[in-house]
Image (spheres, grey):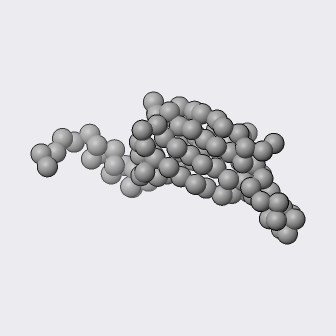
């Protein structure tokens, strides 16, 4: 399939997802499975539950992404899971508070 340039909206944040379903032929030949690469970028570098910088590079077996029905569904599920992390809850709480400094 090659590289797919996809987009999605999560919690009113536009996210670009670049998905390569077979990042390395060497991995496939040596270990017998395809290794996928995801590049995730939020609009205006807005923090996400999986990255404070708005950018994330992630490698995982292609079969794991296919289990969710594709890259967008995988990323959406990942984000939805991470909203429960302590770090994200703290970020949300702090972003709602006004600061003087």
Work out whether residue 21 or residue 50 is closer to the camera in this orientation and state it: 21
Give me the residue at 43% from left, 43% from top: 45
Note whether 31 is above or below 92 in the view shown. Answer: below
User: Which residue is situated farthest in the bottom direction here?
Assistant: 30
**Residue pictured at 50% horizontal, 33% vertical:** 14
Residue at far left of view? 100
- Residue 42 percent location from the top left of the image: 48, 40
Query: Residue 93 sits in which quadrant?
Result: top left
- Residue 76, given in percent of the width and then of the height, sits at 58, 40
| Image quarter (top left, top right, bottom left or bottom right) of the N terminus | top right
The number of numbered badges drawn on the structure is 0
Give the image location of residue 57, x and y in percent: 58, 54
Towards the viewer: 97 or 19 = 19
The x, y position of residue 23, in whole percent, is 74, 55
Q: Is residue 73 visible?
A: no
- The answer to whether residue 71 is left or right of residue 56 is right
Kindly identify the residue that appears in the image at 78 percent across and 44 percent down. 2
């Amino acid at each position: 399939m090659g590289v797919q340039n996809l987009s999605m909206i999560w919690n009113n944040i536009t996210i670009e997802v670049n998905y390569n379903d077979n990042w390395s032929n060497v991995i496939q030949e040596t270990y017998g499975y395809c290794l996928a690469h995801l590049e995730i970028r939020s609009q205006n570098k807005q923090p996400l539950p999986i990255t404070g910088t708005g950018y994330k590079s992630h490698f995982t077996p292609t079969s794991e992404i296919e289990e969710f029905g594709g890259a967008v569904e995988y990323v959406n599920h990942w984000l939805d899971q991470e909203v429960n992390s302590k770090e994200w809850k703290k970020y949300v709480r702090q972003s709602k508070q006004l600061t003087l400094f």
